[in-house]
Image (cartoon, rainbow, N blue to C red):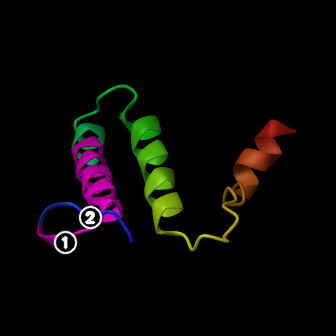
């Protein structure tokens, strides 16, 4: 039987709610120009994607834009 939290909501929902709240705060910080906010928001987005992915899914980074690939040489 799956562990549940208050009112029968599973721990995965609580984790999702915590991550999405943190992501929203980082987007606000990004708008305000806070150093490091972009990296933190990207990390949180990856955590949310991993949490929502089917159990057998393989998470891969998105392809790099051509401009970045060209600059990397």
- Residue at image x 47%, y 46%? 42
Q: Is there a contact, CB below 8 Å, between mark 2 and mark 1?
A: yes
Q: Quadrant of residue 63?
A: bottom right
Quadrant in the picture for the N terminus: bottom left
In front of the other: 19 or 30: 19
On the image, the x and y values in percent for residue 43 come to 48, 43
What is the magenta range? Answer: 7-26
In front of the other: 8 or 29: 8
- Is residue 13 one of those drawn in magenta? yes
- Residue at image x 37%, y 68%? 2
Would you name the residue on which mark 2 appears? 4
Label 2 crowding class (10 Å Cα cut-off): few <14, some 14-19, many 20+? few
3 w.r.t. 33: above or below: below
- Residue at image x 81%, y 46%? 70
Would you name the residue on which mark 1 appears? 8
18 w.r.t. 26: above or below: below
On the image, the x and y values in percent for residue 39 come to 47, 37
């Amino acid at each position: 039987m799956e562990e549940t939290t208050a009112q029968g909501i599973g721990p995965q929902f609580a984790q999702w709610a915590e991550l999405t709240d943190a992501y929203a705060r980082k987007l606000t910080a990004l708008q305000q120009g806070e150093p490091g906010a972009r990296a933190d928001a990207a990390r949180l987005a990856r955590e949310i994607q991993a949490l929502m992915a089917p159990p057998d899914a393989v998470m891969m980074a998105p392809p790099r834009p051509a401009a970045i690939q060209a600059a990397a040489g």
